[in-house]
Each structure stands twice: as C-alpha cells, then as structure tokens.
Image (cartoon, grey):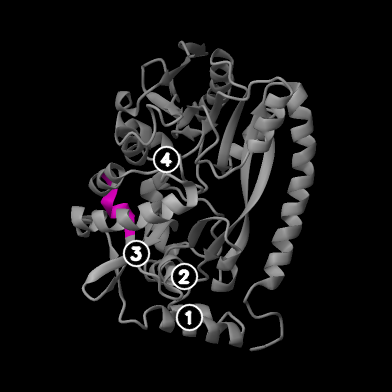
Amino acid sequence: MSEADSGELTVRVATSLKAVPAGAWNACANPHALAQAVSAACASSTDLGIDRDNPFVSHEFLTALEESRCTGGRSGWSPAHLVVEDESGALVAAAPSFLKSHSQGEYVFDHSWADAYERAGGRYYPKIQVSAPFTPATGPRLLVADGPQAEEARQALIAGLEALRAQTQSSSVHVTFAQEPDVAVLKEAGYLERNDLQFHWRNEDFGSYDDFLGTLASRKRKALKRERREAVAAGITIEALSGRDLTEAVWDDFFSFYEDTGSRKWGRPYLNREFFSRIGEAMGERVVLMMAKRAGRYIAGAINFRGANTLYGRNWGCIEDHPFLHFELCYHQAIDYAIAHGLARVEAGAQGEHKLARGYRPVITRSLHHIADPGLRRPVAAYLVQERERIVEAQAALEVEGPFRKGNDGDA
C-alpha cells in the first residue's frame, strides 16, 4: 500500500518489523506497560481482563517469528504491518497485520466461509489477518500510543486496513482475539463480531493453591489432590525456568517435545527451533518454561509467556507418557505460578473443556471480521447472530458444570 494521508497523520505498510524501531512499536503496543507492571501485584478478581503488557504484540515476539521465518517467505503469513506516523515522523499507532494465503494457525476457523465463497465463484484468499500469529491469546490489535491524537490514529488504522484490503484485492479483514477498546470501534466501523469460548483461571487473591482448592466442592478438591500426586509419582520433579535458565540445551529438549506434539496435531509444527532461541535471547524474562524431569533428564515441558497481570499457557509436549502430567505442567503449575507472583489470570489457550475440572472458567473471546462482498457478508452475519447465542448458552451451561462450591451446598 502506498502512503496515505489522514489529516496530519500518514499511514504506510511495513513489510518487515526490522524497519520499525522496537521502542516506538512497543510504546504503541503496550503504552501502559510500566504503570501496569508496578501495580500488577494489586490485580485481582476486579481485573477487567486487560493485560497492559501483552507479550504477543511486542516487537520482540513478532520479530522472533519473522527472523526465524515462521512468518514471511513461504509461510503464508506475509507481514504487512500498518504504521501511522505524525507530521514529525513519530510512530503513533500500528497494527500487526499479515496478508494470508490460507487460514492455518489462526484458531478462529473460517474454512467453511472460504469454501462456500469459492464454490460460489469468489476468491477468498488473500485475506488480511490482524493478530499475533499462532497465538490464541486475547490482546490489543489496534496499537495506539498515548497522546492527543490517539483516537484519530485508531481511526487511521481502520481506514488503513480497508485501503490495504482494497489494494491487495483481499476478500476480508480479520481481527482475532481482540479486546476493548478495539472491539467497540471496529463494530462501529461495520465489522461483524464473532464469539468463541476459552478457559481462563481467575486469581481471587489466593495466598496458596490450597486456598484456591477451598473454593471447590469437596470431591473435586480430593480429585485434584490425587491427580497432582499421581502426576509426579514416577519420581518426576518439575522446574520453572526463565531468563538465563533457558539455555540452548533446554530449548533443544523442549523443542523435541513440542515437535512431537505439533506433528501429531497439525502435521507440521508452526514454530521452528530457531524461534525458541530468539525469544529466549530477546524476551527470556517473559518466558516461563515448566519442565518435568525424571531419572536425570527432561521428559516433558510446557511454555508460558508472562504479561503484567496474566500468565499465558501456549505449547506443551512430552517424550514419555505419565498419567496427569499434561494437566500438572499446563494447568496446575500455571496456577501455582500465578498465585506466587500475584498474577490476576491464567489464559490456558484454545479449546479444551477438560480445563473446566481444573478450576478454569469459560470465558467468551471476541473477533471482528470485515467482509467486502455483500453476497458473503449477509449469510455470515446471519450465522454469527446464531453462533453468538449458542456461545452464551454454552458458557452458562459450563459455568454450572464447574467444580466450584454452589451456594449453600457447603462441601457437597
């Protein structure tokens, strides 16, 4: 897309984050990061679901994907990041956007839309994807720095996305796993809202894991205690590694776990070995790697990323099968870590109703979709109305099924 003026603002496309200064990008991505980090210990159940220091839209994370060739090249994720600059050339807003030739690695599934459109003679790809690639975690998508032009810059991004869609002859723009205020302004701009469910754990100012267990029905408490004992019964110990602990040898072990699981789930893992080295170097203090060891060697691991008030569970894998070890590494250890570090939430990734029994609650996630062709937009809009209703009903039903004590039931 050629440069476009929006008043005193200029919108352009960066096809590589190497062309965008890290500090300027991060000031847009997480403008309240420092203040939020200072107050993170105070975050509790009153938290509104916003993490002011989201790791997945940081320059470091997105650059690691690009430089390791997980995005760009033949990946089908061609960087087309929108940047908005003021008249002095300072970056005031940005959007992590990609030109997509497929719908892999997004976790908001539109394959049926693509199939229907192409059967009707349309061309669904390319499309514009605004997201953190391969990462089903909520976060900001229209990245706007603080300042007097903030709202104007946000509107410039929305206009820029439409201009980019038109210039690339893309069928649509998809802004996935969005949060406020992006949801509100995109809906006002005519985007269609789509909902789905994830399972997140909420810290209610617990002092320990036992405090959390005290909120569960008695039989659920007993089941989880037994599950945790059995997970490590084969002489397994668990370590939480961050920063300098993330050696290349550790990454070698974890990647072997991840590659095995990813190959079985997707045929080919989305992330390569180089990516993990790069994030370890660039943002290792924000990585929390739960590693299980038996007989002197690592046998399983789960990777998490830390925001200001949220721990984000991402990938896991193993080379030995042990009962409940997956649940221990991915869910129980994450809760332990969140409590110990005063974090408000654990986001446990996409899907998985088995998380419900471990104390994770059903939470509605939101995505926004702009479809240019009215012939496709109309049926999709009608479908999304029904889908949103089903999601609300499913969330209510799952809440009832949760392991928490009900009303005056005591320990029932």
124 relative to 322, above or below: above
In the rendered image, residue 410, in percent from the top left (x then y), is placed at: 66, 88
Q: Distance between the residues labelled 1 and 4?
A: 35 Å
Residue ID at (37%, 26%): 73
Between discs 2 and 3, the one toward the N terminus: 3
Is residue 151 visible in this depiction of the protein? no
Region rendered in magenta = 282-288
Residue sitting nearer the eye, 330 or 25 = 330
Mark before the other along the chain sequence, 4 or 3: 4
Residue tagged 4: 57
First-in-chain label (1 vs 3): 1
Q: What residue type is labelled 4?
A: Val
- Residue carrying label 3: 319
Q: Disc 1 vs disc 3: Cβ atoms closer than 8 Å?
A: no
Report the residue marked by disc 1: 227
Q: Tell me the kind of residue under disc 1.
A: Glu
Q: How many marks?
A: 4
**Secondary element at tag 2:** helix
Is the C-beta separation of discs 2 and 4 under 8 Å?
Answer: no
- Reply above or below: 336 against 379: below
Mark toward the viewer: 2 or 4: 2
CA gap between label 2 and label 1 equals 8 Å
Residue that label 2 marks: 327
Q: Residue at x 62, y 57 (%)?
A: 363
* Residue 232 lies in quadrant: bottom left
Q: Position of residue 162 (x, y in %)?
A: 59, 20
